[in-house]
Image (cartoon, helix red, strand yellow):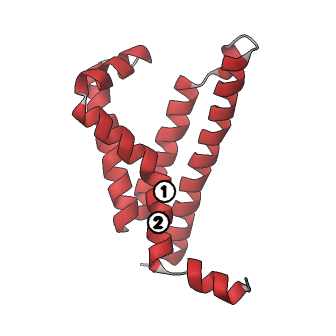
């Protein structure tokens, strides 16, 4: 496919919204699951040592859903993207401490997930950077 055809296919609003939806999908799903199973959300916060767990659960739900909505809607997209990048990095450092695990399949899976999450954080940084590049200077 020639570059002009690829640009025509991927350069439009539909492809951009689909990309934002894909990037935010895990956060929308996670926020909705936590919202509909708040005791489970509190249990997750407790599992990772975050206290007070109910407050952290509310903050995580608000961040996952609010920042995703900002990115998809284009309202302060850069800020929503930076929020999810920072959240992803912190959650990854808390939940996927593969370097503390003994060698074996669990460590291998945790390490893979750790680096996948770093890539996701990088994707959000790219969204923020692109949004700030396109914003008019005020």
Residue nearest the viewer, comparing 23 with 53: 23
Q: Check the image and name the residue furthest to the front.
A: 1
Is residue 33 visible to the viewer in this orientation of the structure?
Answer: yes
The residue to which callout 2 is attached is 18
SS type, badge 1: helix
Quadrant placement of the N terminus: bottom right
Identify which residue is drawn at 65% across, 87% down: 5
Label 2's element? helix
Count residues near mark 1 (Cα–Cα under 10 Å), then give few for <14, some for 14-19, many for 20+: few
Residue assigned mark 1: 22
Residue at screen point 49% across, 71% down: 16
Between residues 11 and 89, which one lies in front from this camera angle? 11
Q: Position of residue 42 (x, y in %)?
A: 29, 21
Q: Are marks 2 and 1 in contact (CB under 8 Å)?
A: yes
Residue 131 x, y percent position in the rendering:
49, 69
Which residue reaches farthest right? 103
Q: Position of residue 43 (x, y in %)?
A: 33, 17
Q: Which mark is residue 7?
A: none
Quick one: quadrant of the C terminus?
Answer: bottom left
Q: Residue furthest bottom?
A: 4
2 sits to left or right of 28: right
Task: Please indicate whether residue 2 sits to the left or right of residue 127 in the image.
Answer: right
Of residue 96 and residue 37, the one placed in the foreground of this image is 37
| Residue 52 versus residue 73 in the image, above or below | above
The quarter of the picture where residue 79 lies is bottom left
**Residue 83 seen in render:** no
Q: CA distance from mark 2 to mark 1?
A: 6 Å
Locate residue 91, reporting x and y percent.
50, 32
Dot 2: few (<14), some (14–19), or many (≥20) neighbours within 10 Å? few
Q: Residue at x 43, y 50 (%)?
A: 25
């Amino acid at each position: 496919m020639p570059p002009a055809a690829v640009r025509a296919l991927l350069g439009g609003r539909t492809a951009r919204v689909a990309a934002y939806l894909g990037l935010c999908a895990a956060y929308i799903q996670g926020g909705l699951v936590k919202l509909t199973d708040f005791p489970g959300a509190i249990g997750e916060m407790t599992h990772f040592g975050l206290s007070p767990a109910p407050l952290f659960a509310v903050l995580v739900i608000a961040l996952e859903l609010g920042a995703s909505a900002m990115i998809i809607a284009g309202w302060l997209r850069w800020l929503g993207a930076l929020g999810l990048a920072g959240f992803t990095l912190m959650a990854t450092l808390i939940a996927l401490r593969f370097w503390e695990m003994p060698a074996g399949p669990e460590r291998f899976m945790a390490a893979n997930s750790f680096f996948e999450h770093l890539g996701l954080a990088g994707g959000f940084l790219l969204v923020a950077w692109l949004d700030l590049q396109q914003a008019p200077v005020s």
